[in-house]
Image (cartoon, rainbow, N blue to C red):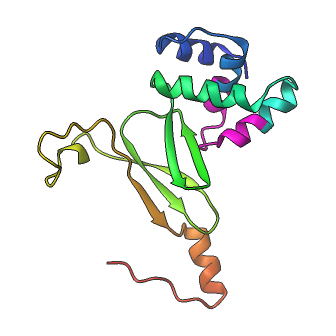
Amino acid sequence: MLNKASYTALVAHGIKPTVQRLAVMGYLLEHSGHPTAEEIYTAMNRVLPTFSKATVYNTLGLLEEHGAVAKVFLDERRTCYDVLTAPHAHFYCHRCGCLHDVPVDDTFSLSEVGGLPAGSQVESVSVTYRGLCPKCQAEQQAEGHEPFATT
């Protein structure tokens, strides 16, 4: 978890490397599957038993503040962290909980949509498609459930 890539990422974002920050950033880089703070804490605690939840949350807050990670809000119980900070969307399967990155082209910009109050300044945009992944669709059909119609 402590590797050159995590050191480079921290320095590139103006963050002073510490053992804890290197460990959290290393975990995020090695586990790009959008882990939650709890998942990171559990993994860190196995390797460094003195790691606290507060350290994980504080480190994630610092990483987000400096643009090294982005939060992905799935619902009121689950917030994930993403090291891919370039513009992209997500697909979330509400059945199995998988979360996938969805690439967008260079022209993608919801910050320029009409209907915003005059004078608004958009600071970030988050797009998450929700539905069933192909595996869950197949399982649902095998269970005899009809798939939802898409338009």
Whole-percent x, y for residue 129 in the image: 42, 60
Q: Residue 29 location in percent, x, y?
A: 61, 29
User: Is residue 142 one of those drawn in magenta?
Assistant: no
Task: Using the image, determine if residue 127 lies above or below residue 54.
Answer: below
Residue at point 66%, 24% (across, down): 26
Q: Main secondary structure of the magenta part?
A: helix
One can see residue 96 in this view: yes
Q: What's the residue at 65%, 37% (across, down)?
A: 31
Q: Residue at x 57, y 47 (%)?
A: 79
- Asked if residue 108 shows in the view, the reply is no
**Which is more toward the observer, 125 or 97?**
125
Q: In this picture, is 135 found above or below 5?
A: below
Count of numbered circles on the image = 0
**Residue 137, image x, y percentages:** 56, 76
Would residue 35 be counted in the magenta stretch? yes
The structure residue drawn at horizontal position 47% and vertical position 57%, both measured from the top left corner, is 91
Q: Quarter of the image holding residue 10?
A: top right
Looking at the rendered image, the quarter that the N terminus falls into is: top right
Quarter holding the C terminus?
A: bottom left
Percent across and percent down for residue 130 are 47, 64
Quarter-of-image position of residue 38: top right
Name the foreground residue: 32 vs 81: 81
Residue 89 vertical position relative to residue 93 in the rendered view, above or below: above
- Looking at the image, residue 1 sits to the left or right of residue 107; the answer is right
Magenta-highlighted residues: 25-41
Q: Nearer the viewer, residue 72 or 30?
A: 72
As drawn, is 25 to the left or to the right of 123?
Answer: right
